[in-house]
Image (cartoon, helix red, strand yellow):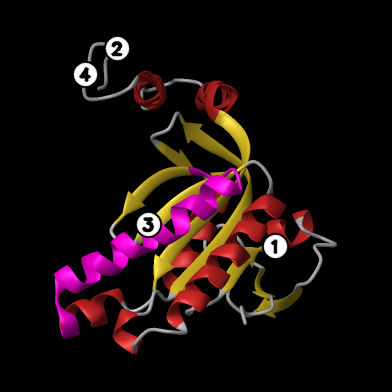
Amino acid sequence: MASEHDGRLKGSEVRLWALVEERTRPGVDTRLIDERIWDLFGEEWAIMFTDLSGFSRQVAAFGIIHFLQIIHEKKRLLLPIVAAHDGILIKVEADSFLILFKRAAKALTCAIAMQHATQQLNARRLPEEKVLLCVGIGVGRILRIGAADVFGQEVNAASKLGEDTAQPNEILVTEAVRHACDGFAGVSWHALETPVPGSERNFRVEYPFAV
């Protein structure tokens, strides 16, 4: 059980896990505790997961140091774009980013800019040097635990779309993003026959590639 004096956890994490621990007690009103958790941590955000295509394959072919260079170049190229679109980087895990935006349209605009940046970079590179970006986006009410982590159905869906489903150069979004970005100029929406945990209907964003 986390305590207020557990130096390994920050305040928000301590409070969350204390409530989760309380939820495990026999006879407790779990509905009331759930309401407290959502009241403390529930927020509306757009969630973006990015991934690099072919991580395992390229590591096997060219070695981990080569791929560490690609990850470094991804950060150097894309994080300034995220900042310019008011994204908040929550975590980096290997070749994946988890980023939050206050509005889905801002997340989609950023995703297109990120794809354009990688496409322009890749145009002058050998195949093994290319930064092949995959993006998944969700939007909705989530549990945000300070700057440490986020949880929720749209988080799960964005993760599955960005890390497991999207192909290089693709931007995949949940139905909630499709509705939130209705009227977004310059794109079209291709319905996927791929439900993922957290979102039954999902879409590939058709956007103009960089020239």
- At label 3, which amino acid type do we have? Lys
Q: Which residue is mark 1?
A: 175
How would you classify the magenta stretch by its main secondary structure? helix
Mark 2 and mark 1: span between their CA atoms? 39 Å
| Quarter placement of the C terminus | bottom right
The question of residue 76 being in magenta is answered with yes
Give the residue drawn at x 53%, y 54%. 81
Secondary structure under tag 3 reads helix
Mark 3 and mark 2: span between their CA atoms? 35 Å
- At label 1, which amino acid type do we have? Glu
Residue 151 visible in image: yes
Q: Which residue is mark 3?
A: 75
Give the residue drawn at x 69%, y 58%. 177
- At label 2, which amino acid type do we have? Glu
Q: Which residue is mark 2?
A: 4
Residue stretch in magenta = 61-88
